[in-house]
Amino acid sequence: MEYIYYGMFTIIPCAAGCGRTAITGSQICAVHAANPETEASRIVDQIQKQKTVKDLNAPGLHFKHADFSERRFYGCNFKGSSFMGCIFTGALMRMVFFDFASFLDCDFTQSDLQFLSFAGSRIHNCTFEGSELVHINYSGTHITQCTFNNSNLYNSRFINATIEYSDFINCNTKRVNFIKARREGVSFKASNTAEAVFELDTY
C-alpha cells in the first residue's frame, strides 16, 4: 500500500478503494468501518491517554460528550466529523482541519487555536470565550447562538459565513475578514471593529 506524507498526517487510502482516507490505526475510512462508533471511541481513548496528539487522521467520525480539554493537537484531520457536547477547554491546536464538520453544544473556553480551518462547518450553541483564535478559517461556516467574547481573532476569516445571534463582545477583530458574511443578531460591543474588514473596497 502506498503511503503519502504531506508534512502532517499520513494519508493512507481506504482499503475499500473508495478514495477516502483510512482512520489512524485502521485500514478503512469511517464510511466503511464495521462499527464507526467503536472507531470514534478508540480515537477518543487514544487522545485521552496522551497530552500531545500529532498527525491524527480521523475524518467523518461522530464524537459525543468527549473530553479533549488541555490536549495539544498538531497537524490533525477531523474533516467532516461531528462533535456533540464535547469539551475542548484549554486545548492548544496548530494546523488542525475541521472543514465541513459540525459542532453542537461544545466548549472551547480559554483555548489556543491557531492556523485552523472550520471552512463549511456548522457551529451551534458553542463557546469560544477567552480564547486565542488567530489565523483561523471560518469561511462558509454557519454559526448560530455562539459566544466569542473576550477573544483574540486576529487575522481570521469569516468570508461568506452566516453568523446568527452570536456575540463578539470585547474581542480583538484586527484584520478579521467578514466580507460577504451574513449577520443577524450579532453583537460586537467593545470590540475594535474599525480594524476589521467588512467591505471589499476596504480590503
Image (cartoon, grey):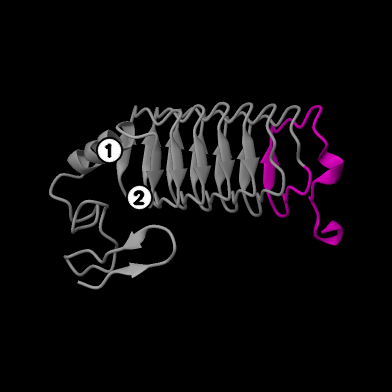
Residue receiving disc 1 = 46
> Label 1: how many residues lie within 10 Å, few (<14), some (14-19) or many (20+)?
few
The dominant secondary structure in magenta is loop
Label 2 Cα neighbours within 10 Å, binned few <14 / some 14-19 / many ≥20: many
Q: Residue at x 70, y 36 (%)?
A: 152
> Would you say the residues marked 1 and 2 are in contact, meaning their CB atoms lie under 8 Å apart?
yes
Q: Position of residue 48 (x, y in %)?
A: 32, 31
Residue occupying image coordinates x 40% and y 31%: 68
Which quadrant of the figure has residue 201? bottom right
Choose between 103 and 21: the one closer to the eye: 21
Residue lying at the far bottom in this picture: please name it: 2
Quadrant of the drawing holding the N terminus:
bottom left
Q: Which mark is residue 107?
A: none
Nearest the viewer among 50 and 85 is 50
Q: Quadrant of residue 38?
A: top left
Residue at point 34%, 35% (across, down): 50
Left or right of residue 100: residue 182: right
What's the magenta region?
A: 174-203
Give the number of the disc on residue 56: 2
